Image: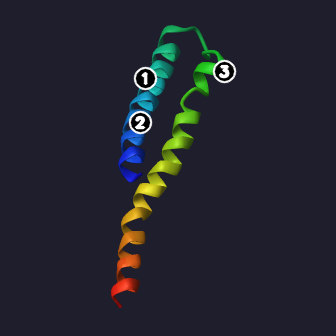
Amino acid sequence: MSKWIRQIHRWVSIAFTLCVVANFVAMAMGDGQPPAWVTYSPLPPLAFLLFTGLYLFVLPYLRRGGAARVGG
């Protein structure tokens, strides 16, 4: 399960990076503010990265805590 989450996290991070780059390109090429959908397009991948990143961060502590309880 964690292998899939790690892989999805990597691919979503690529999508997030592309959204941010597109946002900067739209700001540089246009006169003024880009459309709202361009401005807010990085937010859904960012929210997903938050949750998957927190899971991946906590995962080693959960494994270590479970092993300590079983062996202890």
Label 1's element? helix
**Residue at 42%, 46% in the rendered image:** 5
Q: Say which of 9 and 31 sits in front.
A: 9
Q: Amino acid at mark 1?
A: Val
Q: Say which of 28 and 72 sits in front.
A: 72
Q: Position of residue 41 (x, y in %)?
A: 57, 26
Which of the two marks, 3 or 2, is nearer to us in this view?
Answer: 2
Can you say which quadrant of the picture contains the C terminus? bottom left
Q: CA distance from mark 1 to mark 2?
A: 12 Å
Q: CA distance from mark 3 to mark 2?
A: 21 Å
Q: Say which of 26 and 43 sits in front.
A: 43
**Residue at 36%, 41% in the rendered image:** 7
Q: Amino acid at mark 2?
A: Ser
Q: Quadrant of residue 35?
A: top right
Q: Which residue is mark 3?
A: 36
Q: Mark 2 or mark 1, which is nearer the start of the sequence? A: 2
Q: Which mark is residue 13?
A: 2
Locate residue 29 relative to residue 66 in the image: left or right: right
Q: Which residue is mark 1?
A: 21
Q: Say which of 57 and 7 sits in front.
A: 7
Q: Mark 2 or mark 3, which is nearer the start of the sequence? A: 2
